[in-house]
Image (cartoon, helix red, strand yellow):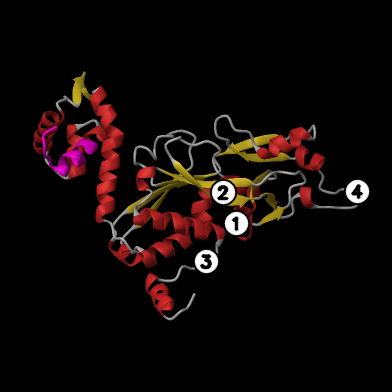
Amino acid sequence: MANTYDLNLLTALDALLATGSVTAAAARMHLSTPAMSHTLARIREAFGDPILVRAGRKLVPTPRALALVEPVRALLAQAQALRAPVDAQGLTSVRRRFVVRAPEGIAVVFGASLSRALEIDMPLASLQFLPETHVDPGALREGRLDLDVGSFRSTDPETETQVLSQQKLAGAVRTGHPLLKLRKGNALTAQRFAAARHVGVTPRSGEVSAVDTALDELGLERHVALFVPSSFSALIAASRTDLVASVSERTARGMAASLGLQVFELPVSVPSETMRMAWHPRQGADPAHQWLRERMQRVLNEPRWIVPSVASLTTGAKRGVV
């Protein structure tokens, strides 16, 4: 490359590599298509590589361009961090949309608390939840996600992770379900539990339900009549049918009243599920992202916690209030 270059070239390069289109990159950068074409020419000259070449009606990246994707994103994130506020008080000026991928129940049960915390500390920012998915493992690496939350057992080796909580599983059925009509000699046993029809959350590829593992150790097998994408969907299905759901106790109890559910302890020994959050290392030192991680941890561990304002925290500290 030349001895000096415009940092905007890296921003344009990132847009070009992300979209694979001069027109789409121009729209992202709020430039005209001719202006982006001129910028691409400058990028090619600076890097000594075509970067994007035509293949039929599309543009495809060269090997050199593919090698630049992650370093360019990392550099841009570091440059953004240099401009970021260095204290919590300065977060009030941050304009940003945080994109979080999480099980549906997280958004339903905890979304309001997180939104309230955001309103107080980062009023110009917003929060977008995306549903949990079994595909698209590169979303953190490629910068399309800020945070990935779930009980996943495997992650991209490039990502950093932190345990959010240990979640005990519980059963949930509609109020008045025959399974919980316990009479003499009709206790809720593992056999009766396994014999019921169940609704299950679709597991990630290669993973097995802890409930099925526990039943298998007893020589039992349940019939999962319906698979749904999230715990929240499973609870809705259980509230409208005789299906039995086995989900996080916290999520089940959080939705029990509104859905008319009875929550019960599983009659089998099932280890707690570990809820984790994952992020790309380039976000690690960003104050706004640090705020997001800290608040996510706090809200999931204390669902009724109402975050005080930064100003009150500061005032309290000055007065010696802890």
Residue interval drawn in magenta: 1-15
Front label number (3 vs 2): 3
Where residue 160 appears, x then y in whole percent?
Answer: 45, 43
Q: CA distance from mark 3 to mark 4?
A: 43 Å
Assess whether residue 111 is covered by the magenta stretch.
no
Give the labeled residue for mark 2. 232
Give the labeled residue for mark 1. 255
Name the N-terminal-most of marks 1 and 3. Answer: 1
Q: Amino acid at mark 2?
A: Phe
Q: CA distance from mark 4 to mark 1?
A: 31 Å
Where residue 318 appears, x then y in whole percent?
Answer: 40, 78
Q: What residue is at 56 percent from the left and 59 percent from the top?
A: 301
Give the labeled residue for mark 4. 185
For the N terminus, the image quarter is top left
Q: Amino acid at mark 3?
A: Trp
Give the prevailing secondary structure in the magenta stretch.
helix
Q: What residue is at 56 percent from the left and 48 percent from the top?
A: 232
Numbered disc 2: secondary structure: helix
Q: CA distance from mark 3 to mark 2?
A: 22 Å
Q: Amino acid at mark 4?
A: Gly
Q: Is residue 236 above or below residue 316?
A: above
Q: Amino acid at mark 1?
A: Met
